[in-house]
Amino acid sequence: MFGLGTPELIVILLIAFLIFGSKKLPEIGAGLGKAIGSFKKGLGDVEEAGGALKKSLPVVKELTEVKETLDKAKAVTRVLGK
């Protein structure tokens, strides 16, 4: 993750427990979980919109086809080179 091991996470959780108390921690955890879920959903929406944009632009479509053709040609040359 960020180079955090088990001891570091335990210290962080203890400090959070001391600062926020036992009643607030579940609320904070739930809010954090919802925020992460919302972020992932938004990221998925952006990736989907980008994919739709790529498919709708003719130049990008042609370039994608050229790239696929080049990739196939590279694969053939690798097979023939062996």
Image: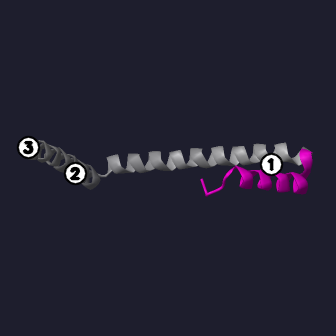
Image quarter of residue 80? top left
Mark closer to the chain start, 1 or 2: 1
Which amino acid, by three-letter code, is at mark 1?
Answer: Ile
Mark closer to the chain start, 3 or 1: 1
Mark closer to the chain start, 3 or 2: 2
Residue closer to the observer: 55 or 7: 7
Describe residue 73's horizontal placement relative to residue 10 as left or right.
left
Which image quadrant: the C terminus?
top left
Q: How is the image coloured?
A: one colour
> Range of the magenta residues?
1-22
Residue closer to the observer: 64 or 19: 19
How far, Cα to Cα, is label 3 from label 2? 20 Å
Instruction: Tell me which residue sits at (90%, 55%) in the image.
Output: 18
Give the SS element for disc 2: helix
Which residue position holds label 2? 67
Residue 62 percent coordinates (x, y)? 22, 51
Which amino acid, by three-letter code, is at mark 3?
Answer: Leu
Which residue position holds label 3? 80
Which circle, 3 or 1, is nearer the viewer? 3
Give the SS element for disc 3: helix
Describe residue 81's horizontal placement relative to residue 39 as left or right.
left
Q: Which mark is residue 68?
A: none
Which amino acid, by three-letter code, is at mark 2?
Answer: Lys
Instruction: Tell me which residue sits at (23%, 53%) in the image.
Output: 63
Residue closer to the observer: 15 or 49: 15
Give the SS element for disc 1: helix
Which residue position holds label 1? 28
Crowding around mark 2 (Cα neighbors within 10 Å: few <14, some 14 to 19, many 20+) is: few
Residue 39 percent coordinates (x, y)? 61, 49
Residue furthest to the left in view is 80
How far, Cα to Cα, is label 3 from label 1? 59 Å
